[in-house]
Image (cartoon, grey):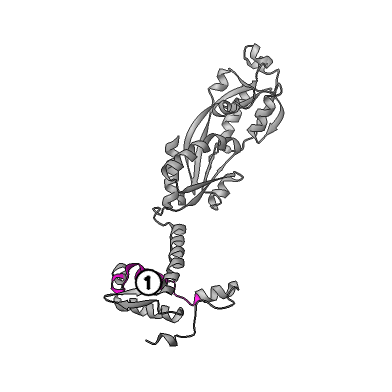
Amino acid sequence: MDYNNLPAKRLIDPGGQDKPQVFRTLRNIDLNLLTIFEAVYVHKGIVNAAKILNLTPSAISQSIQKLRAIFPDPLFIRKGQGVTPTAYATHLHEYISQGLESILGALDLTGSYDKQRTITIGTSPSVGALVLPTIYQAVKREAPQLLLRNIQVNDTETQLAQFQTDLIIDSNSFGSRALAHSVLYADGLLLVCRKNHPALSQTATMENLRDYEYALFMNDGHNLNHLRQRINDLFPDRQISFSSYNMFTIAALIGSSDLITIMPARLYNLLRHCWPLEQIPFAPLNAESIEISLHYNKLSLRDPVLENVINIVRQAF
C-alpha cells in the first residue's frame, strides 16, 4: 500500500476548535475501531488481537485499513510474525488508552474498577455530625477509592426517586415502593438544660417541669407523629418559646438560657462538649427512642459499587 497517497479524510482538522465540528467528526468514526487499535497495539499483532477480541484476523486487518484512512499514518508496520507501532501510533495510544480507561471508570458496570467515584449522602446537620465520621472511616477502610459528598436533605422521596442523591440518613420513613430503608440505630431521648439550671435542684416531675419554657426541634416525618403525640402527653402544657430546624442552634441557646429541650442521647453526648449542657433525669421521656435509618432507591442495588457502600454503612452500625 502506498502510504504517501492516503485519503484526505483526517481526524485532526485545522480549526476544529468548534464543538459542533468535534461531534460531527466523532460521528464519522466507528469508536469500536479504537478498541481494535488498542488490542493490536498492546498485543503487538493482528492474530493476537483477533484472539482477544474474538474476531477473525481478516476483520482486524480491515479495521486497521479503516483507521489508516482516518489518521495520517500507517500506524503499524509488519515485523516478523507481528507488527510494530509507528511513532504516531504510540502518540495515539497514550490518548486512546487514557480515554478508554476513563470510560471504563465512569461505567464501572461490574463494580470492580478501582477508580475514584463520588457517593452522595444526604443528612441533616446534626445527623451528619453523628453518622458521617463512622461512615467515612468504614468506607475508606473497605473502598478507599471512593469519595464522599454530604448534602442537605430537602425532600427525601424526591431526592432519592430522581437520583439526586445516592443515600439519605434520617429519622423518617416513607411509603414509596421505590424506596427501601435499613435502621442503623435507635437513640434514646433526654431532657436537656444548661448546667446549674434551676430545674436540676428539683425533682423532675410533670408539675415542676411545667414551670419552664422550652425550645422545640422541628423535624418532619409521618413516622414521628406517634412519638410527638406521646411527648405532648408527657408535657401537655409546656410553653414553646423558641423553635428551630437546627439542633446546633438549639444547643447553643440552651447553653446560655433557662430554656429546656428534648434531644437524642447521642447528640447530647456530642454537643455537651461544645456547650454547657446537662441532662435532667426524667424516666418517662428516657423510655422513648427515635430510629435513624439509611434510605435508598431500590434500583440502586443494581449498581455494584452503591450496593457495596450500602452494605458497608449497615455493618458500621
Q: Position of residue 143 (x, y in %)?
A: 43, 45
Q: Is residue 291 left or right of residue 246?
A: left
Residue drawn 35% across and 67% down?
42
Residue at x-position 30% and y-position 67%:
52
- Above or below residue 238? Residue 244 is below
Tag 1, which secondary structure? Answer: helix
Q: Residue at x 67, y 17 (%)?
A: 197
Q: Position of residue 32 (x, y in %)?
A: 41, 71
**Residue beneath label 1, please?**
36
Residue 181 falls left or right of residue 273:
left
Q: Is residue 278 above or below residue 12?
A: above
Q: Is residue 227 magenta?
A: no
Q: Residue furthest left?
A: 81
Q: Pick the quarter of the image with the C terminus.
A: top left
Question: In this picture, is 32 found above or below 144?
Answer: below
- Magenta-span inclusion, residue 29: yes
**Res. 221 image quadrant:** top right
Q: Residues within 10 Å of mark 1 (few under 14, many from 20)?
A: many
**Outermost residue to the front:** 87
Does residue 60 appear to the left or right of 253 in the view shown? Answer: left
In front of the other: 95 or 302:
95
> At which x and y percent is residue 105?
45, 57
Amino acid type shown at disc 1: Ile
Q: Position of residue 290 (x, y in %)?
A: 54, 31
Quarter in which the N terminus is drawn: bottom left
Identify which residue, 225 or 111, lies in the foreground.
111
Q: Please state the total of marks drawn on the protein image.
A: 1
Q: Please tell me whether the stretch drawn in magenta is mainly helix, strand or loop.
A: helix
Q: Nearer the viewer, residue 60 or 155?
A: 60
Q: What span is colored magenta in the figure?
A: 27-48
